[in-house]
Every structure is written in structure tokens, then in C-alpha cells.
Image (cartoon, rainbow, N blue to C red):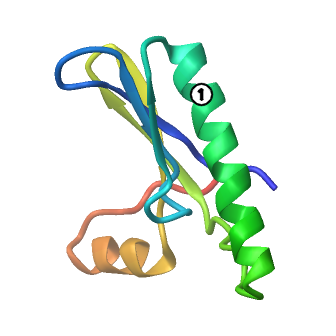
Amino acid sequence: MRYTVLVEKGRESGFVAYCPALRGCVSQGRTRPQVLKNLREAMQAYIEALLEDGLPVPTEVGRVSRERPNEALQRPVSRVTALAEKRKGRAARPRR
């Protein structure tokens, strides 16, 4: 299964990465490759723990790209978010 991963610069140094679909699954590292490796391990442990406890493994609903300075980040967008934006007069971006 594939998940969206967000990587941001740390407040003081290094990088922080997290997976929005897996709540609380966060990791950090000094470099981008290191933080991605650490997060991959954290995601595997998170999913294994869910399976061991007999809980459902979350899936992503969709993705939308949005730009931040010096980084292109992706985050999942739920149907509820898309409907709320339509009601406000803003069209939600189409899913890929």
C-alpha cells in the first residue's frame, strides 16, 4: 500500500516526516534520505501493531498537491473537505 508522506525542515535542524493517513506516525533525521528511511521503519511498525491488535489499516482517500517555499508537499483530502470547499465557492482540486 502507498501513503503520502510529508517532509518538512525541522525547527532547529534536520528534517521531520510524517504520514497523515497514519495518525501519530512521525519521524526525524538529519538528512532527507535518513528521515525517509526512519519514517518507513516507523510506518511498518505502526501497521504491524494495527494488524496484531486486529484493527483496520487506514487507507488514503485521495491526494492534492500544494506548494510551500522550496518544497512541493502532498496531503490527503477527504470527500468531506472537498464538499466543504465546494460550499464555500472554492472548487477542490481533482484527484489524481
Relative side of 58 to 21, left or right:
right
Residue in the image at 27% along x and 63% along y: 90
Relative side of 96 to 78, left or right:
right
Q: Quadrant of residue 48?
A: bottom right
Whole-percent x, y for residue 47 in the image: 72, 64
* Viewer-closest of 92 and 78: 78
Q: Quadrant of the N terminus?
A: bottom right
Residue in the image at 47% along x and 39% along y: 27
Whole-percent x, y for residue 89 in the image: 23, 70
Label 1: state its secondary structure: helix
Residue in the image at 55% along x and 63% along y: 22
Above or below, comparing residue 69 to residue 42 in the picture: above
Q: How many marks?
A: 1
Above or below, comparing residue 82 to residue 73 in the picture: below
Kind of residue indicated by mark 1: Leu
Residue at the extreme bottom of the image, as rendered: 54
Q: Is residue 80 visible?
A: yes
Above or below, comparing residue 86 to residue 5 in the picture: below
Whole-percent x, y for residue 13 in the image: 26, 14
Above or below, comparing residue 33 to residue 17 in the picture: above
Q: Residues within 10 Å of mark 1 (few under 14, many from 20)?
A: many
Relative side of 81 to 74, left or right:
left
Whole-percent x, y for residue 78 in the image: 49, 72
Q: Is residue 3 visible?
A: no
Residue in the image at 59% along x and 32% along y: 38
The residue that mark 1 highlights is: 36
Relative side of 47 to 88, left or right:
right
